[in-house]
Amino acid sequence: MSSTFGRLFRVTTFGESHGPAVGVVVDGMPPGIAVDAAAVQHELDRRRPGQSALTTQRQEADRAEILSGVFEGVTTGTPIAILVRNTDQRSKDYDALRDVYRPGHADFAYAEKYGVRDHRGGGRSSGRETVGRVAAGALARTALASVGVRIVGGTVRVGDVAAARRDWDEVERNPVRCPDADAAEAMAAAITAARDAKDSIGGVVEVVATGVPAGWGDPTMHKLDAQLGAAMLSIPATKGVEIGGGFAMAARHGSETNDVVEDGRYRTNWSGGVSGGISNGADVVVRVAVRPATSIARPQQAATAAGGSTTIAIEGRHDPCICPRVVPVAEAMLAIALVDAWLGQRALRGRDR
Amino acid sequence: MSSTFGRLFRVTTFGESHGPAVGVVVDGMPPGIAVDAAAVQHELDRRRPGQSALTTQRQEADRAEILSGVFEGVTTGTPIAILVRNTDQRSKDYDALRDVYRPGHADFAYAEKYGVRDHRGGGRSSGRETVGRVAAGALARTALASVGVRIVGGTVRVGDVAAARRDWDEVERNPVRCPDADAAEAMAAAITAARDAKDSIGGVVEVVATGVPAGWGDPTMHKLDAQLGAAMLSIPATKGVEIGGGFAMAARHGSETNDVVEDGRYRTNWSGGVSGGISNGADVVVRVAVRPATSIARPQQAATAAGGSTTIAIEGRHDPCICPRVVPVAEAMLAIALVDAWLGQRALRGRDR
Amino acid sequence: MSSTFGRLFRVTTFGESHGPAVGVVVDGMPPGIAVDAAAVQHELDRRRPGQSALTTQRQEADRAEILSGVFEGVTTGTPIAILVRNTDQRSKDYDALRDVYRPGHADFAYAEKYGVRDHRGGGRSSGRETVGRVAAGALARTALASVGVRIVGGTVRVGDVAAARRDWDEVERNPVRCPDADAAEAMAAAITAARDAKDSIGGVVEVVATGVPAGWGDPTMHKLDAQLGAAMLSIPATKGVEIGGGFAMAARHGSETNDVVEDGRYRTNWSGGVSGGISNGADVVVRVAVRPATSIARPQQAATAAGGSTTIAIEGRHDPCICPRVVPVAEAMLAIALVDAWLGQRALRGRDR
Amino acid sequence: MSSTFGRLFRVTTFGESHGPAVGVVVDGMPPGIAVDAAAVQHELDRRRPGQSALTTQRQEADRAEILSGVFEGVTTGTPIAILVRNTDQRSKDYDALRDVYRPGHADFAYAEKYGVRDHRGGGRSSGRETVGRVAAGALARTALASVGVRIVGGTVRVGDVAAARRDWDEVERNPVRCPDADAAEAMAAAITAARDAKDSIGGVVEVVATGVPAGWGDPTMHKLDAQLGAAMLSIPATKGVEIGGGFAMAARHGSETNDVVEDGRYRTNWSGGVSGGISNGADVVVRVAVRPATSIARPQQAATAAGGSTTIAIEGRHDPCICPRVVPVAEAMLAIALVDAWLGQRALRGRDR
């Protein structure tokens, strides 16, 4: 029950960081869509560690193999399974952690929940689980592209540095994936400082969908924004999500934030493209709060499974700021949630073929 | 598909603001729990409009009738349907709005989605839909109480005024439902000022669950925080949700925010009681961004269904700040999501009776 | 979880036989469909007891009230709640049964499952739960009619008497609801004989959908026939279901039963309109095995909750053969399952509006 | 949506007969259960073709690889993905069928539903999809064994030959998998005769679960028998399912078929272990109608995609009677449905750990 997102476009991930493989089964992909395996690989490469000095230096080849659901380059409407073997695992790195609950990590909660715990690298709670999300997201993006929807995203805050612009073409030009070249430099400096201090730093990622027609999302419980909330908060290390004006609207008046329709579209976008839980034709704008990476090299006090206390320094190869690598994951989840909402609207009010 | 929340504890609301009734069906309520109809009514009374000068003066009696699932005062494990008749409706108030899309409202999105729209008072998008949520939440609270979980909540921000304390006993003593008596006064002043200016104002609601044992929540897609995200963002007028440290963690370092387990529980709570999507034994802390009410008496430009433009002033009886009435709804959704997670954990790892 | 059928067209029933009311919430009904409240009432009247000497003489008025989801005579796409008050209940009739497990009934299983049991007339296991199904089925039929699908059904076997013809226009002309006037008389005689012997008798109901286009049903787990199996076996007192040739195919050869497509449609229909779990354009033909009614006036040995044994004679007003009243219920479930499959196909491969 | 069975114990299969692989993801498996990879392989071997002269001579090694969810030989509570590579595929055998709709097969329905069709060996509609079911069933059986539930099954009818005994230990001793050694010989003769006539023959498979406690199954829509109906009718080539007395009850009286509880258990079992949709402590008995294999070597008329007609003889390596190989699949689906019902009951009324 737990590892599936979506009702009509259903994404089920599997795999632990140090098991044989991670992957995903995507069920509900419409048939007849040309799937470019390179597009899947491209998104996995964006998620991959080791892309710059600002991210972990682990090397994961992450070659995707499509096992089913695609025939002669086109989706058949049957489940698409995608497999990525785990390779650069170094399980031994984690032997010392078998009976230690790393601060800020999910180790304790996992132990309490399951009784059994794969302690190697976080197991299922590892960021590596997002490989399946990103692969599924690549399929979702392909499907969305067929109806004119495009997904972009970037890091819009690191520590105290906020992006002032949304130049999405800039994102892949800097290692922070910031849509503001100037802010990107300051963000990189903040990340480097955190890493040098054997520490980590948090941030905010923004993802945007353009071209979404009005009508997607299913009130009252599967509202589009509710699904986006679930989608984003299911990503490891996220602790908040907001749509459009978000928390800033707490300090505003209705006369400022009431978006008005003019000539069939919205002039302002405090609603972030979602009104009453339904897309309203404006850009769908979502921001995600990303906590500082919990794995830091600085010595920390930690609890042991036996009930005692110890001191650990997590020496492995870890990201000082997760935001750059959360970007493709948040984009993927946005795409997945949108396809699900799209198909829901087609079921409710589309036309039969 | 759209109107049901939860997988094991399933809450399905129905009803429009100006139809014959609103209500809810709760499926999955464990049997053998004494249900106090007065407890349901108590929560509905908290949600009810007209409780103070700060809220709308509409009078809704909101008498709950339990139609099924309770026998001799005890739940039977079968669906519990609860019905609340609509009474003080004044549908005529809305005649002028049949072909107008109110700014900030979901009118346009509903029209685009469904083609058909019950324009009277927002129809299904009305806050009145939350009657069913609150009734279901009362049942959820009763179930949670049997395992020692308690839900509290309050308004912690209105405009620029933030609560500095969390004195939950204070909440029902002031009309803002603020857990800080001093802040409550300033909040009330801000709300009054907005109302007098024929305007509205936003805020933030915080809800907290105490006594939640470690282990609730189902990674990776039905994480507890993901479900809380969906739960809160399905409430009308919410535009953001955060858990524990939330967006503030963007500006922090890992060395500050890594919660440590000591003697089996957490000393700090940046995680808001949820680690890796699983409750960790600390208080579950959720904050919800509430936009300014979209119905304001000030004249606004509005689009018409015909594609033109008009000016409207929404003269009805509306809340200048929704927060006080969102509090019981957010508490209800927290309770509902927690029961669902609890039963999920019992399915996964409980003991057979 | 338990009381909802369907994924896109979701039917949630509620209510016990001797509680205040029974009813249903239908979520996912497409908007813009004219709903005739009389059509709902017509189906409820067909299900109602007391229609002939062959059925129970209980009188249930069963007036349906539509509480939501319909505005100005047209569906709005929001949940449609339908309420039917219980009236002619005579709970006292059942006082003697509080601690007795009636033979063949679900009393023991309910007690074991829930611990708590509403013993009055079967509570939730009562045939009265089907009121909600039939009301929902009336909506489903209305939706299906808009795409040219028509549902018929009748009793095709009672005891040793089998219908030789399928004259569906005959069904409502005889109290057995048999599509063969000659067989109907023999069936009526068998039922009367069973009743006179203070006994009951079983039978088979057949329901057929015509006009179903090819392509409905979702392999491999939500195949159309699988959903029909679930739909029919969720009806009280059913113990078997077969599609097309069904069990008779066990004694056949492939050369006999391989339906062939000719000019785009099937000449024979051993498949019962479903191939590989997908409608194939032929009539969808489903038969349901109905056990003899478990409530009989003849004295029977029965277990008591205390672990002892007693003798009971169920004197109430009961059907000696349930088939005539199962017909509208099986038709309803067929309609519901078909709408769900239809919308699934529209989601997968329909066109956006 | 389509390829997942179950709500709490969720089984998602993927893969086509002639793609790279088939497999399954099992989500909801309780943690802490020792999983014997050999047990999975054992069940796959039972399903495998080429086991006797009575089954197809295709050779499929079907080596199962567990990709996730098991750590140090024990389940972790996270999704268990199992992969089986396709090897002996001979896709070329099917080139002639690209534009032909084989009689009795799902080719036409698939083409109509999806527009795109993997014509090689049935693609997703192939019996090969059941590899994933059987692998998941092996896990389900392991879980059930921990609570004392055991699954058996066999072929109880082929053509006109019915098994008179239920000697389950006999099943694996004869190639028909019949629990009656005498009947097995006659069945084998009937199958051989069909094969020699370039034809195929149908049959009935029975599966039984012993040790099921009372209380499993969720009325009213997820009744145990309803789920069993869905489970069995989702297996390729099945056209009917019955529980306990099944269709034979149509010709019986209530005084014969009303099972009575005595000393806390049932003396007779017309109900097949399920009362009111809930297990009642008696053996759960399910029979499945299996149609004659649709692939026969005898020349048949067939439709072409272009709308014409042709004659084909399906020369490949096919089963003249599918029953022996349906047995392990039906057992698997019984096990899967039971685990799902078990966990449902634990959620509803179990005890917290």
Image: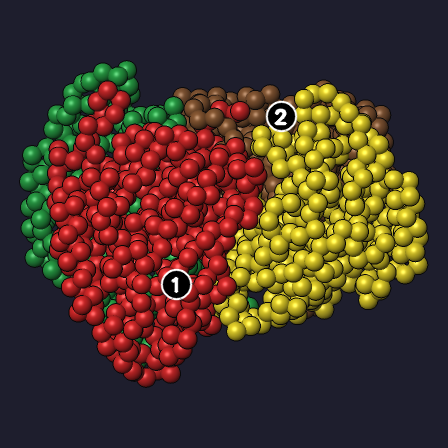
Chain colours: A yellow, B brown, C green, D red
Residue sitting nearer the eye, C49 or A87: A87
Three-letter residue code for mark 1: Ser
- Few, some or many residues within 10 Å of mark 1 (<14, 14–19, 20+): many
- Few, some or many residues within 10 Å of mark 2 (<14, 14–19, 20+): many
Q: Is residue D102 left or right of residue D9?
A: left
Q: Quadrant of the C terminus of chain B?
A: top left
**Residue A19 visible in the shown view:** yes
State which mark lies toward you, 1 or 2. Answer: 1
Chain for numbered disc 2: B
Residue sitting nearer the eye, B243 or C152: B243
Q: Which residue is mark 2?
A: B213
Chain for numbered disc 1: D
Compared with A195, A168 (above or below) is: below
Q: Quadrant of residue C122?
A: top left
What is the total number of numbered labels drawn onto the structure image?
Answer: 2
Residue sitting nearer the eye, D325 or D174: D174
Three-letter residue code for mark 2: Pro
Gap in Å between the C-alphas at discs 1 and 2? 45 Å
Residue at 45% from the left image edge and 53% from the top image edge: D63
Q: Are marks 1 and 2 in contact (CB under 8 Å)?
A: no
Q: Is residue A78 left or right of residue D224?
A: right
Position in image of residue D68 (x %, y %)? 56, 46
Residue at 76% from the left image edge and 51% from the top image edge: A58
Position in image of residue C13 (x %, y %)? 40, 42
Q: Which residue is mark 1?
A: D125
